[in-house]
Image (cartoon, grey):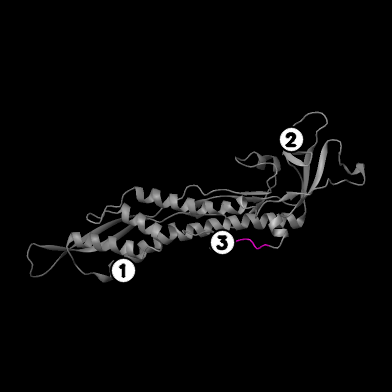
Amino acid sequence: MNHLTREPVAVRDHTAFCRRPGVRKKDLGETTRPTGAQMTRFRIDAGAYRVRGRRGKSLYLPEIKVEEACSSGHNESFYLPKGWYSSGQMCIGGFFGDFMPVPGEREIRYYISREISEQGRQAEREHCEDIVHAYEITLLAAEQVIRCAKTFFERRRIPVTFEAAMRQVYEKLVREAPHEKIRRIFRECINPKTGEVRSLFGTRMRELYLATADRTLKRDEEQWHTFRYDETEYRPRWYEFGYKTDRYDYRMMKQPLKRESGMPSPSTASLITLD
C-alpha cells in the first residue's frame, strides 16, 4: 500500500517534535525518508501449448504473473505554526552556536509569523512532492513496464520454445524500461534463459527509489529552505507582557536568503531525476 504524505501537518507539541531523531530545536519542519517500500513481486512463467501435427512436442506461451504490487512505503511531514519557540542556541559576538546554560548566557527564542509558517509549510510540501515523484519514476514506473508486458503476452499468444519464451519476456522488459538505471536492474537481475527473477531485483529497485528520493535534501544543502534569525535582537516594549530579556534573546525568524532575493526554488521535475 502507498502512504506517502502529500501535505505537512502542524506541530502541536514542540517538545515532543524536538525529540524526534534528527530534529533540532531550530528546525521549522521535517519530512521523513520513506520506510517500508517494496518493489513489485513477479515471476516469469510459460504455459505449455501443444501444437497439432507435432506429436509429443510442446511449445510454450510466455507469461508474467504479478504476485504483489509495489508499495511506496510511508513517511511523515511536519511544520511549525505561528508562535514563539526555543531554539537551543545562543548568540556570541554575532555568531550562533549551541546554548550553554551558564550564568549570563541567554537562549534564543524565535518567533514564526504566519507568513514564515506558511513558507515553512511550503518547504516541507516541496519535500513531499519530491518523494512522491521519486516513487513514480522508479518503483511505479518499473511496475508499469511489468504490467504492460504481462498484458502484451496475454494478448499475443504465439507459442515458442521454452528458451525463446523466457528470452522474449526478458528482452521485452529490458527494452521497455524507461531509463538506463532501471534497464540495468532488469538486465542484471533476470536470467534470460530460465526467467528467474533474483531476489536482488527488489532490493536494487528499493535502493534506487530511496537514492532518488534523497535528492530532495539538496533543497536544504543548497539553502533553499534555510530560514534565518533576524540580525538584531527583538526588544519588547513592556516587560509585563511576559518577555524575560534577562533569560532569553528574542529574535524574529526570516525567510531564506534565496527566497528573499527572488530566486525561484527548483521544480520537482528538474530536481528529482534518474540522471
Q: Could you tell me which secondary element the residue under label 2 belongs to?
A: loop
Question: Residue 235 appears at what percent x and percent y?
Answer: 88, 45
Q: Which residue is mark 3?
A: 268
Task: Give the magenta-colored segment's residue range.
Answer: 263-268
Q: Amino acid at mark 3?
A: Thr
The residue sitting at 34% across, 56% down in the picture is 186
Question: Is residue 150 depicted above or below 242 in this figure?
Answer: below
Q: Residue furthest front?
A: 93
* Nearest to the observer: residue 73 or residue 196: 196
Q: Earlier in the sequence, mark 1 or mark 3?
A: 1
Question: Residue 248 appears at what percent x and percent y?
Answer: 82, 38
Q: Could you tell me which secondary element the residue under label 3 belongs to?
A: helix
Label drawn at residue 152: 1
Magenta-drawn stretch contains 265: yes
The residue sitting at 65% across, 63% down in the picture is 264
Q: Amino acid at mark 1?
A: Phe
Q: Which residue is mark 2?
A: 99
How packed mark 2 is, by other alpha carbons closer than 10 Å (few <14, some 14-19, many 20 or more), is: some
Q: Could you tell me which secondary element the residue under label 1 belongs to?
A: helix
* Nearest to the observer: residue 231 or residue 191: 231
Q: Amino acid at mark 2?
A: Phe
Q: Main secondary structure of the magenta part?
A: loop
Res. 258 in view: yes
